[in-house]
Image (cartoon, rainbow, N blue to C red):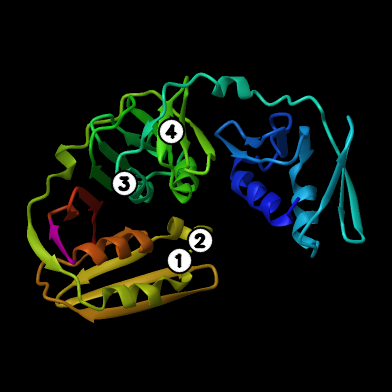
Amino acid sequence: MKKADLIKALEAVRPGLANKEMIEQSTSFAFMEDRVVTYNDEISISYPLKGIPIQGAIKAEELYAFLSKVKTEEIEIETDDTEIRLKAGRAKAGFTLQSEIKLPLEELDEKTKWKSVPEGLMDAIKFAAFSCSSDMSRPILTCINVDKSGRIESSDNLRITRYEIEKLPVESFLLPATSARDLVKYNPTEMCSGKGWIHFQTEEGTVFSCRIFDEAYPDISKILEVEGVEVSFPKTIEEILDRTSVFSKKENANSGDIIVSLEKNKITLRSEGISGWSEEDANIRYSAEPVSFMVHPQLLKEIVSKVRNCTLGSDRLRFEGQGWVHVVALQVKE
């Protein structure tokens, strides 16, 4: 078969691999004759794959590494009950095949009927993921609340995002932000509910399944209400963000956030990392007390590409656009 077709299939399901094999075969590609599947207890991804009549699991790291390095356009495949053998030109490799698939895939079988994904759902989930917490001491705040009414919301106690779309064709669910960040890359067109899972399907037949939680999300409506003065960000804010977010990485402090400070007639953006820092200011019309807040640069860039005005209250800042609201807690400068 064509190497490119197999590589495409494996890349599609790779996010479903576990980093460590806490569950047997969770670091393997599971071939099921007409599909290849991965499962790590948080997400499972299935991709339609024709032309490989293989039934069994193969360690993912070695298989993908070999295929990535060979240069031929086509590969020959042979298999028996214990091994799969690949030939690419003069290169050959054999991989241990576990003929019995031991992943708990049966828990994914219980599904409702496929329904169309509402317009804007993936945009809403992507937008809301920025405001989720990474602190597992409060698991509910690590999730996006996807309400059947079409209300998508998230919070980490410092930031709150709410996005409104049309009503969903499934019941409400809590979607972990870690799963959501992979899901939005697939642009699914259909969705359905399962028992403890939510399933999405693309036009080409990739099925992306996410484990979900069933809890009551806190009511954040009152916190979204902010009264105060209007502040307008400078026209060059996006360019400044590009320059000052150089040291803003997730592995650094503040989870990749930048610090935005407001003082008399000036706004300052600053990022800090283990290898350095970057700072830039600009003139704005502002005469209230000096304040600062933290925000993810990519989120702020998306916000200011839509609206440059916000409402500054006594303890929080509110951005509002068509169908969405984002509120950030302020830190008052001493």
Label 1 to label 3, Cα distance in Å?
Answer: 23 Å
Q: Nearer the viewer, residue 3 or 121?
A: 3
Label 1 to label 4, Cα distance in Å?
Answer: 25 Å
User: Could you classify mark 4 by the number of other residues whose Cα lies within 10 Å: few (under 14), some (14-19), or many (20 or more)?
Assistant: few
Q: Are marks 1 and 3 in contact (CB under 8 Å)?
A: no
Magenta segment: 308-312
Q: In which quarter of the image is the C terminus?
A: bottom left
Hey, what amino acid is under mark 4?
Pro
Q: Which of marks 1 and 4 is nearer the N terminus?
A: 4
Q: Relative to 228, say whether 176 is above or below.
A: above
Residue shown at the point (74%, 44%) measured from the top left: 60
**What residue is shown with label 2?**
252
User: Could you classify mark 1 by the number of other residues whose Cα lies within 10 Å: few (under 14), some (14-19), or many (20 or more)?
Assistant: many
Label 2 to label 1, Cα distance in Å?
Answer: 7 Å
Q: Which of marks 4 and 3 is nearer the N terminus?
A: 3
- Can see residue 334? no
Left or right: where 31 falls relative to 312: right
Hey, what amino acid is under mark 1?
Ser
- Residue 139's disc number: 4
Helix, strand or loop at disc 3?
helix
Q: Which of marks 1 and 3 is nearer the N terminus?
A: 3
Hey, what amino acid is under mark 2?
Asn
- Residue 124's disc number: 3
- Can see residue 33? yes
Helix, strand or loop at disc 2?
loop
Helix, strand or loop at disc 4?
helix
**What residue is shown with label 1?**
248
Percent across and percent down for residue 203 are: 47, 43
Answer whether residue 237 is magenta in the image. no
Left or right: where 44 falls relative to 316: right
Q: Do the residues labelled 2 and 1 touch (CB within 8 Å)?
A: yes
Name the dominant secondary structure of the magenta segment.
strand
